[in-house]
Image (cartoon, coloured by chain):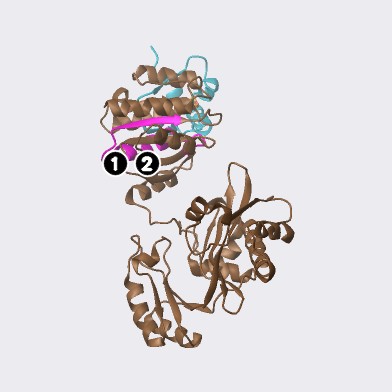
Amino acid sequence: MRFYEYEAKTLLGKQGIPLPKNGTANTPEEAARLAGEIGGPAVLKSQVLSGGRMKAGGIKFADSPDEARSAAEVILKLEIGGQLPRSVLVEAKANVRKEYYAGVIYDAVAKRPLLIFSDMGGIDIEEVAEQHPDHVARMHFSSLLPLSDYKVKETIASIGVTGGELTGLVPIVTRLARTFLQYDLTLAEINPLAQLDTGRFICLDCHIDMEEEARDRHTALLNELGVKREETRMARPPTPFEIKGAEVDAKDTRGVAGRVVEFDGNLGLIIGAGGGSLTLFDAVRKHGGKAANYCEIGGNPSVTKACELTKLILSKPGVEKIAVMMNVVSNTRVDIMARGVIKGVVESGYDPAEKIAIFRIPGSWEDEGFKILRKYGVEYCDRSVSMNEAARRAVEKVKKG
Amino acid sequence: MPSMFIRVDADSSVHSNAELAKKLTEICPVDIFAQNPDGTLRIVEDNLDECVLCDLCVEACPPGAIKVVKLYEG
Ligand code: SF4
């Protein structure tokens, strides 16, 4: 789940990371008052969850409270990425000498958090990594053992930062990494981490995402920030298709049919099990397939749940076929999945043999499941066919039409 | 929509036995059995395809009195 910038800054401020003087306004008058309190040039920033604010006109500068009022009037009415701002952040404009980048992400391959630091901040870090790799330092660190300032210092120094800059940056970057661990974050990024004319370091912009599953561990923080339970906090508002997907999941407590995400392809996906969703989604793309959706089904869903999810996916315009693929399952029953999916296809008015490109769910009760699939003429495979190969076959079938 | 995969056949001795009907209602994990107001057995058609083939109902009844039929076999 994503935080608004003002919330992310509140969190970083609590952790002792320096911030510009700021406040949030919900009306132009409040923005003018805050700009007056700042007592100098201010920057006004639209509080939306999507990126591209500068390009969209969601960030404006003001030299006086009157200018701040006019800027806020525009920003508060401006939709960015389909979202109206929650508020406008009014912040003291900083006189910047140099911009740095500091970020922490979770490296799923290394299974450890990764600290990334660059002395070329203010721009996209991927771009810096590609064009100026010698300006990017990286360090994996333990999510269990305490993180020492010294390791952070070594990392920053490895790209040539020395002296007062090094001394000023280490505590901020270390606090950022500790915040990442303390609050189960999946992304904690300060960009730019600016050095002011005065030599002081300050967080000018930041992005923070928290692991969705960790929300219950941090209710005190979320309550303090005013994040409501029902807020999904995705980068964009859910589509009607995604809302219906969440309803399918919520209506029946048996198993999971969650995280339905809409895409514009022609191959509907019913995928899941132990990381299977991401692997299979990637495999479909690798073979040139165009997914109509992403989802995570598992935990032994009922026939009804699998059926309703199938019907939802088939109701999406442009879906030509569906692929039903999972990793090897132990607690999800293959026969129950087969029943649910076939029922959904039949209730949608289609022939399962035509509509299901492939059914690849190996595991418990597979013999029973395969009997059902044979009866309806559905192409299926067991664990001797890899997820990658199953995805390839599904994509090929859609291409053949 | 009628069930596509499972049918449950219970003979008349099961249908009319309120005590057995109560037991079946309690043991079936997916609510395929219910009781009519007079206590007799009612099979909940809408739930038939959810049958998990656990055989608890078969074991709770006298031999052969109830059958769980897989419509996709044979
Ligand atoms: S086999 Fe199990 S799930 Fe099926 S009807 Fe009997 S008790 Fe219910």
- Magenta part of the chain: A297-325
Q: Along the line of sight, which residue is nearer the eye, A312 or A203?
A: A203
Q: Along the line of sight, which residue is nearer the eye, A328 or A280?
A: A280
Q: Mark 1 = which residue?
A: A316
Furthest-top residue in this view? B74
Residue A127 % position (x, y): 47, 54
**Which residue lies at the image location 34% right of the left edge and 18% below the top edge?**
A377
Q: Mark 2 = which residue?
A: A293
Q: Colour of chain A?
A: brown
Q: Quadrant of the C terminus of chain A?
A: top left
Q: Is residue A236 visible?
A: yes
Residue A245 % position (x, y): 38, 45
Chain displayed in cyan: B
- Where disc 2 sits, the SS reads strand
**Which residue lies at the image location 67% right of the left edge and 60% below the top edge?**
A157
Amino acid type for the residue under numbered disc 1: Lys
Horizontally, residue A269 falls left or right of residue A183, namely: left
Q: Quadrant of residue A13?
A: bottom right
Tags 2 and 1 touching, CB below 8 Å: yes
